[in-house]
Image (cartoon, grey):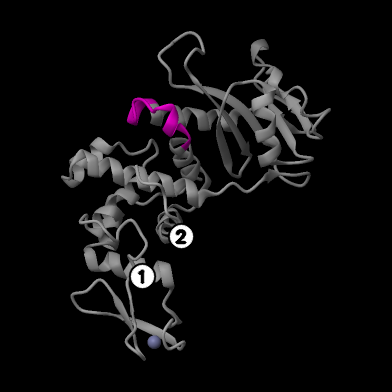
């Protein structure tokens, strides 16, 4: 069953103005009641009129919920930030800076920077918990080629490795090339030993069973074999291939072209949406809660 994602009407209802956004940021970061840093008492913090802060009911100590976030030193209203974050969570194919420029009436530079920061945080929130394991789901591993001008060869294309646990999370890595030397260390890092791994017949995957202790099955695409069964489980790489289609629709359709330098950040944006696909509302709040915890490099 597909989960119904948030729509724009719900966004407007939930965040009608700047104050609602500020209160939501405060609650997401600190909760309803928490220990006051100054008087140490458990306290409710009330909004201070005309200021972007809340104060302790006992001692009047003030907390600014935007402190340490990208919202702190910007003239862009909080609601605009929320709106762009909402677009990132609700869209399937990504959000173009040009679209943000148009919707918010800000400069392209501002729009680009907002997108850059939000995308960076999406990758940070997502994290990369190792997947699979003997009791875990089957992990599909596959490589794909993204970008480049050369239509036929691999020439200037980027090689991306993807690992997805069926029914679970996806992890992608932009790797140097398609050799075992580049690919296997990433698999060992992200897929637990003893996992069931399904791949195509590419040479890079040949050592997975003998040398690295995985239960490895392959599907031979060159023989037009797309699915076969071992112990009742289909051997295929359909889940990761569906993910690649989504990424390519986004990168070719929305972003047009992505430089190698930023490719991994874009990939992480798609990972984030995939990994939180069953919790569209949580997607937004997780992102919001992450903002103060990490300082990203500014573009
Ligand atoms: Zn206090």
Which residues, given as a range, are shown in magenta? 252-264
Task: Identify whether 274 is placed above or below 226.
Answer: below
- Label 2 or label 1, whichever comes before in sequence order: 1
Rendered residue at 39%/31% (across/down): 250
- Local packing at callout 2 (Cα closer than 10 Å; few below 14, some 14-19, many 20+) is few
| Residue 157 percent coordinates (x, y) | 48, 18
* Residue 154 numbered tag: none
Q: State left or right for residue 148 relative to residue 72.
A: right
Q: Are marks 2 and 1 in contact (CB under 8 Å)?
A: no
From this view, report whether residue 289 is shown above or below residue 112: below
Corner quadrant of residue 19 = bottom left
In this picture, residue 146 sits left or right of residue 239 = left
Residue 67 is situated, as x and y percent measured from the top left of the image, at 34, 66
Residue 26: mark in rendering: 1
Q: Does the residue labelled 2 lie within 8 Å of ligand 1?
A: no
Asked whether residue 22 is in view, the answer is yes
Judge: label 1 CB < 8 Å from ligand 1.
Answer: no
Q: Which residue is drawn at 62% across and 48% down?
A: 129
Q: For ligand 1, give the image quadrant.
A: bottom left
Q: Name the residue under label 2.
A: 293
Residue 217 in percent (x, y) is at 75, 27
Q: In which quarter of the image is the C terminus?
A: top left
Task: Please indicate, yes or no, whether residue 2 appears anywhere in the rendered image.
Answer: no
User: How far, Cα to Cα, is label 2 from label 1?
Assistant: 14 Å
The residue at 64%/16% (across/down) is 221
């Amino acid at each position: 069953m597909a989960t119904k994602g948030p729509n724009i009407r719900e966004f407007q209802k939930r965040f009608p103005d700047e104050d609602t956004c500020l209160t939501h940021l405060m609650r997401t970061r600190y909760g309803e009641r928490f220990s006051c840093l100054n008087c140490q008492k458990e306290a409710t913090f009330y909004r201070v009129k005309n200021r972007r802060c809340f104060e302790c009911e006992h001692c009047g100590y003030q907390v600014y919920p935007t402190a340490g976030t990208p919202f702190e030193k910007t003239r862009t209203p909080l609601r605009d930030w929320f709106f762009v974050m909402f677009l990132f969570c609700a869209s399937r194919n990504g959000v173009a800076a040009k679209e943000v420029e148009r919707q918010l009436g800000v400069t392209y530079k501002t729009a680009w920077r907002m997108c850059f920061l939000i995308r960076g945080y999406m990758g940070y929130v997502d994290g990369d918990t190792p997947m699979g394991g003997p009791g875990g789901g089957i992990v599909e591993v596959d490589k794909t080629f993204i970008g480049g001008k050369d239509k036929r060869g691999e020439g200037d294309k980027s090689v991306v490795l993807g690992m997805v646990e069926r029914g679970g999370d996806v992890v992608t890595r932009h790797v140097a090339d398609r050799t075992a030397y580049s690919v296997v260390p990433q698999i060992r890092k992200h897929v637990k030993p003893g996992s069931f791994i399904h791949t195509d017949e590419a040479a890079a995957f040949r050592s997975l069973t003998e040398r690295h202790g995985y239960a490895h099955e392959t599907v031979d695409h060159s023989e037009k074999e797309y699915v076969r069964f071992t112990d009742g489980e289909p051997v295929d790489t359909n889940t990761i291939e569906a993910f690649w289609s989504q990424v390519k629709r986004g990168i070719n359709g929305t972003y047009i072209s992505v430089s190698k330098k930023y490719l991994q950040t874009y990939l992480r944006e798609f990972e984030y949406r995939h990994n939180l696909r069953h919790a569209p509302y949580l997607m937004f709040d997780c992102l919001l809660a992450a903002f103060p915890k990490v300082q990203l490099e500014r573009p």
